[in-house]
Amino acid sequence: MKTLFKKADFLLIAVLCLVCAALFLPRFFGAGKLEAVIYCEGAPFRRVDLSTVKEAYTIWLDAQGVVLKVEPGAIGYESSNCPDKLCVRTGRLTRPGDTAACLPSKTVVVLEGGFFRKGPDVMTY
Amino acid sequence: MGTTVIQSLRGPGSSATAGVIVDKIGSLEEKSLSWRQAGSDIYRINANAGSSVRTGADTAEWVRQCLKISAAGAGAFDITVGSLSAFWDIGGENPRVPAKEKIAELLKTIDRNTVKTNGDTVKIAAGQRLDMGAVGKGIACDEARKILEKSRVKTGTVSVGGSVLVYGYKKGCKVGIRDPKGTANDYMGILNLGSCCVSTSGNYEKTFTFKGKTYHHILDPKTGYPADSGLTSVTVVCDSGLASDALSTACFVLGYENSLPLLEQYSAGAVFIGRDGTVKVTADLEDRFSLNDSAGYVLEPRV
């Protein structure tokens, strides 16, 4: 009896499904809003939707002596008056759940939202 | 420490707990560990060198633990380097290369055997200074764990300036090791870990350049100069934050071969990155380490 599908056809369909999933799933699940919440002395100061940022810009927190750099999908300390500048060397926060606190300037940056975490959960340096 | 704390906590009350941890780490620096902060335990010990100083119970105990690790590592890690590190001031506002005569003079102040502790009191020799900078972040991880154990947080990571506490995981927490050639977000490999503490000492963290030569901040207590054991970084994994932090410094100074007995003594594992781009991993971490192939390092098989 002649079958509608051969074994190779099933394989092809499976591969096509996988390719489609790889192409389209990130559009649905990767588009989650990634928001940075900046706290000064314990109080929320500003919210930045990192998922809509097209070009890098800076936020000056004059009273705290801190400059934050905002980029598409990322935020980080660009400069600070703190003694050893470790907050600056920490680099960019990119993943939901990341929280950076510069103790001397009493500033905190928290990333909220998003769906995917790429790479390591945490860095040692 | 003046450092950055990055937390990722999951479970009920995680935001409030994160705030408690940040406050605790801030007070650690102010009240206990900073040699710059007037009134802290370490500041008072240094200011009263030659006399006994009553400290917080924790501070005296941390000093004792440091002295033990120092002895185990034959002085490769030594908290009495304070006078030497303060003179170099690498990472500070006035970094400088001391003259040879000055180095010789400062080396005389480095001696763990002259540090005496009795209960809550600590006494150092006149002219000596303690520097807890090599263990402050690890101690902060230990303190964070104590807070998490009393909270309802289920799992999480706390990074204090790159020293990491992995909490509540049986396995599966991916800890990236910074690529010494890249920025703080570039990783050369990943350790897949359960609950533990992870610390890294690298020659890229604090540096300054003088007359075309770059000096890093990890000083060899034997020579008085930045350690030169052929490594660019060492990452140590063990149960204790203080120990992982101290051991990463000791191992950086000792080099790969000389570090192995010390690591074994503390049931610790390590990843060594050589200046030549080779990577060596201790046996207990072999199955948990994966190299980032695009970073350009070569993983050496264990002999």
Image (cartoon, coloured by chain):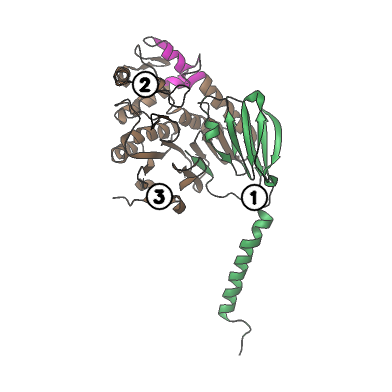
Up the image or down, A88 lies above or below B294; here it is: above
Q: Secondary structure at mark 2?
A: helix
Distance between mark 1 and mark 2 Cα atoms = 48 Å
Residue A76 image point, x, y percent: 60, 37
Q: Residue at x 34, y 32 (%)?
A: B227
Distance between mark 3 and mark 1 Cα atoms = 31 Å
User: Circle 2 sits on which residue?
Assistant: B84
Q: Is residue B190 visible?
A: no
Q: Identify the mark at residue B142; answer none if there is no mark.
A: none
* Amino acid, disc 1: Phe
Of all chains in the rendering, the one displayed in brown is: B
* Amino acid, disc 3: Tyr
User: Circle 1 sits on which residue?
Assistant: A115
Q: Identify the mark at residue B297; answer none if there is no mark.
A: 3
**Shown colour of chain A:** green
The answer to which quarter of the image holds residue B201 is: top left
Seen from the viewer's position, the closer of residues B211 and B229 is B211
The chain letter under disc 1 is A
The answer to which quarter of the image holds residue A113 is: top right
Distance between mark 3 and mark 2 Cα atoms = 34 Å
Up the image or down, B145 lies above or below B169; here it is: above
Question: Is the residue at mark 3 from the same chain as the one at mark 2?
Answer: yes
The chain letter under disc 2 is B
Q: What segment is highlighted magenta in the picture?
A: B31-60
